[in-house]
């Protein structure tokens, strides 16, 4: 997930430091969920990558990565499913709930490096520079905003530290974003998550693994899409009670970002608020929610201790006129409604609820 409410420029951005061996690290955690690595494909170094207007040069695969928070788990999970945990020096990312239950322990096992966050909910400049990583990963360009107390990409480059943002998120928090970057951000979908995995695979010389992970996830996604094709569609609302601060009226945060809309559509549902995008959803009033026919509620879980049944009961009590409230029709999602490798898990859950599978 990207979300500053909770809580990428110079040419030639420095050289990423290298690992000593060129072999692929052993995958742990959720490897069985994402398939077996096929025949090896190798990255030719030095590798030059264009990222959000910057040129990154890697002489070898990075070995000391710092992953910033950004209210996301997309990046740390992507490293995990690609078997790259041993490249992470520290990560500030974690959630209290996951759509893929097998990945929770792997996220918890990633080192935090003793990092703390500032008032803007991410790792401040001084801590980033003191850690001396060879690559800093942020889920959004705003993670490198000096006004928020963060190290800029220019500052990092000046001391030989590369920085990277998922391609679909370049425009997020970047005042001078190009039209192409804005279009990519506005047009996010599940494919954006696959794009992130593919590019990380290339940077870290695990392209074969990335190809297998993406192929496995896409096969599951296509299976759901084929299964629900032609069936009656229902209105699906993804709402996170624990993120009500995102909404001006204090109601549960309704998700209408590009990835969430694609998740719902792939499951055979319709997001009644898709047209307004996330900005529009953040301005929804209690009255607008009340007059909307919601057939299926997908309770969004984020924090430790949240329980889907309890949260669904509260939401249904607040909006008893919904068909979903009458039928007690709900499921739950967590990180799968945002950029990251868990999208297909959310699609499968919502499809089962929509079509009573």
Image (cartoon, rainbow, N blue to C red):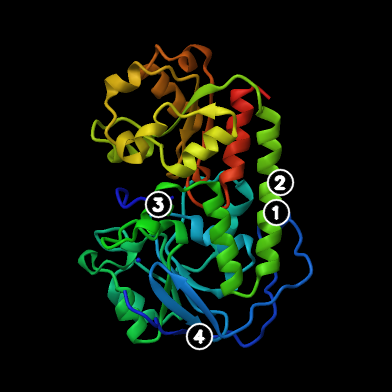
User: Badge 2: few (under 14), some or many (20 or more) residues near its Cα, within 10 Å?
Assistant: few
Q: Farthest residue in the left direction? A: 147
- N-terminal of the pair, mark 3 or mark 1, is 3
Q: Give the x, y percent position of residue 303.
A: 42, 44
Identify residue for label 3: 183
Identify residue for label 1: 215
CA separation in Å, label 4 and label 1: 30 Å
Place residue 195 in its image quadrant. Answer: bottom right
Q: Would you say the residues marked 1 and 2 are in contact, meaning their CB atoms lie under 8 Å apart?
A: yes
Residue found 38% across the figure and 32% down from its top: 275
CA separation in Å, label 3 and label 2: 27 Å
CA separation in Å, label 3 and label 1: 25 Å
| Camera-side mark, 4 or 1 | 1
Identify residue for label 4: 17
Q: Give the x, y percent position of residue 298.
A: 49, 30
Q: Would you say residue 27 is visible in this rendering?
A: no
Residue found 24% across the figure and 59% down from its top: 119
Place residue 175 in its image quadrant. Answer: bottom left
Residue found 70% across the figure and 80% down from its top: 23
Residue found 58% across the figure and 31% down from its top: 350
Which residue is nearer to you in this view: 105 or 297? 297
Q: Which mark is residue 126?
A: none
Image position of 255 (left or right of 10): right
Identify residue for label 2: 219
């Amino acid at each position: 997930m990207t979300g500053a409410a909770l809580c990428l420029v110079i040419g030639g951005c420095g050289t990423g430091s290298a690992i000593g061996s060129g072999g692929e690290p052993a995958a742990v955690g959720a490897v069985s969920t994402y398939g077996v690595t096929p025949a090896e494909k190798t990255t030719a170094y030095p590798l030059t990558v264009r990222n959000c207007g910057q040129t990154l040069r890697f002489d070898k695969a990075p070995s000391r990565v710092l992953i910033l928070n950004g209210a996301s788990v997309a990046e740390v999970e992507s490293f995990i499913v690609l078997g790259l945990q041993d490249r992470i020096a520290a990560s500030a990312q974690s959630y209290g709930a996951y759509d893929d239950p097998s990945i929770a322990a792997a996220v918890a096992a990633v080192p935090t490096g003793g990092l703390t966050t500032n008032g803007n909910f991410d790792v401040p400049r001084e801590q980033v520079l003191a850690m001396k990583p060879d690559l800093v990963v942020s889920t959004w360009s705003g993670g490198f905003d000096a006004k928020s107390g963060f190290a800029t990409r220019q500052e990092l480059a000046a001391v030989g530290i590369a920085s990277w943002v998922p391609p679909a998120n370049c425009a997020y928090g970047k005042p001078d974003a190009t039209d192409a970057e804005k279009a990519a951000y506005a047009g996010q979908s599940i494919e954006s998550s696959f794009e992130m995995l593919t590019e990380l695979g290339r940077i870290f010389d695990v392209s074969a693994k990335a190809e297998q992970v993406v192929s496995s996830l896409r096969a599951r996604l296509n299976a759901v899409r084929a299964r629900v094709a032609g069936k009656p569609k229902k209105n699906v609302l993804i709402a996170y009670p624990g993120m009500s601060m995102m909404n001006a009226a204090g109601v549960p945060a309704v998700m209408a970002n590009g990835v969430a809309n694609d998740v719902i559509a792939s499951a055979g549902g319709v997001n009644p608020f898709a047209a307004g995008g996330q900005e529009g959803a953040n301005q929804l009033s209690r009255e607008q929610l009340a007059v909307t026919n919601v057939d299926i509620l997908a309770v969004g879980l984020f924090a430790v201790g949240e329980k889907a049944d309890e949260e669904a009961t509260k939401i249904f009590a607040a909006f008893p006129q919904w068909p979903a409230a009458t039928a007690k029709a709900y499921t739950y999602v967590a990180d799968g409604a945002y950029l990251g490798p868990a999208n297909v898990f959310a699609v499968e859950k919502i499809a089962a609820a929509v079509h009573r599978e």
